[in-house]
């Protein structure tokens, strides 16, 4: 169980290194860490599925609500995948359009980001359903991001000449939503019995504070995809 903590920290470290690195070449350590992070996310998803399945009742609502979170390991794996894709864009020679797996990089990053947003919506819907949608704001993470995924998918898979202004603004709104969700979750923790004075228990049992920024990260990746599509139109 320490493995995802270590690999996630390593991925953050190499991402910071890549941001500061001005060389237009990939780095073997960064690539290795990103690949390892992706594998850990995939294996962790299997472990979490097994954890839910082995509980009494199997894949019941109770176990899905309170068992190992199915979406958490995949989020770590997705961060590794996006990091790997960023290295492929970095290694593109000057004057050439970036390609990933023989496809335009903007389209690949856009599709991956859109699918990631869709999966994150599923996790948010499950946990907010567990909370009974007691606050009207709880509907936003299951209504705004699906639209973002749809318009991003249209931009990534559609013709090069389509207008992407709405997509850009919707992704920006989704990024803000993720940051706002962190504040709402922090307020939710403070409303539990004992509030922040009982933080050791309430942080574990209250709404997960680190979860909403997943929307922010994926929305930013989507915006990067739009930038690639506009800078390097493929038709």
Image: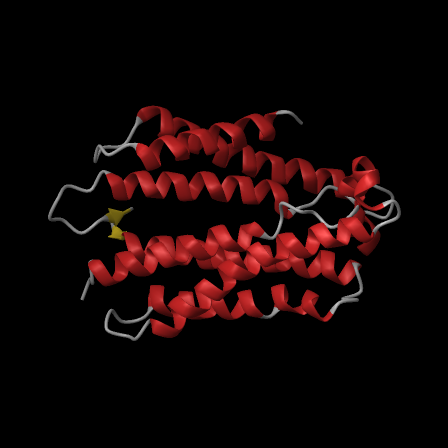
Q: Which picture quadrant has residue 4?
A: top right
User: Is 28 displayed left or right of 196 in the figure?
Assistant: left
Q: Quadrant of the N terminus?
A: top right
Residue 149 in sight here: no
User: Is 164 displayed left or right of 38 in the figure?
Assistant: left
At 40% from the left edge and 35% from the top edge, which residue is drawn?
Answer: 15
Q: Position of residue 120 (x, y in %)?
A: 58, 55
At 49% from the left edge and 33% from the top edge, which residue is drawn?
Answer: 37
User: Is 224 displayed left or right of 128 in the figure?
Assistant: left
Looking at the image, what colour scheme do you see?
Answer: secondary structure
Q: Nearer the viewer, residue 75 or 100?
A: 75
Asked if 188 appears above or below 172 in the picture, the reply is above
Q: Quadrant of the C terminus?
A: bottom left
Q: Nearer the viewer, residue 213 or 76?
A: 213
Q: Position of residue 58 (x, y in %)?
A: 81, 47
At 29% from the left edge and 58% from the top edge, which residue is drawn?
Answer: 227
Q: Nearer the viewer, residue 98 or 183?
A: 183
At 53% from the left edge and 55% from the top edge, which residue is drawn?
Answer: 215
Q: Position of residue 220 (x, y in %)?
A: 42, 54
Asked if 124 appears above or below 34 in the picture, the reply is below
Q: Nearer the viewer, residue 44 or 146?
A: 146
Q: Which picture quadrant has residue 68?
A: top right
Residue 191 in sight here: yes
Q: Position of residue 204 (x, y in %)?
A: 77, 40
């Amino acid at each position: 169980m320490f493995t995802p903590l270590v690999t996630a920290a390593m991925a953050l470290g190499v991402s910071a290194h890549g941001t500061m690195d001005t060389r237009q070449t990939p780095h073997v350590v960064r690539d290795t860490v990103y690949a390892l992070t992706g594998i850990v996310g995939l294996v962790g998803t299997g472990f979490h599925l097994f954890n839910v399945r082995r509980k009494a009742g199997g894949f019941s609502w109770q176990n899905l609500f309170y068992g190992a979170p199915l979406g958490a390991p995949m989020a770590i794996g997705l961060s590794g995948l996006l990091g790997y894709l960023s290295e492929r864009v970095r290694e593109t020679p000057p004057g050439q359009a970036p390609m990933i797996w023989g496809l335009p990089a903007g389209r690949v990053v856009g599709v991956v980001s859109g699918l990631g947003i869709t999966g994150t919506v599923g996790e948010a819907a499950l946990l907010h359903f567990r909370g009974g949608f007691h606050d009207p704001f709880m509907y936003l993470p299951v209504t705004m991001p699906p639209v973002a995924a749809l318009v991003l998918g249209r931009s990534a898979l559609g013709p090069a000449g389509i207008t992407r202004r709405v997509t850009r603004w919707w992704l920006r709104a989704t990024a803000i939503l993720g940051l706002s969700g962190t504040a709402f979750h922090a307020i939710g923790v403070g409303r539990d019995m004992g509030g922040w004075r009982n933080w050791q228990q309430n942080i574990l049992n209250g709404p997960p504070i680190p979860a909403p920024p997943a929307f922010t990260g994926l929305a930013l990746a989507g915006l990067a995809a739009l930038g690639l599509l506009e800078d390097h139109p493929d038709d």
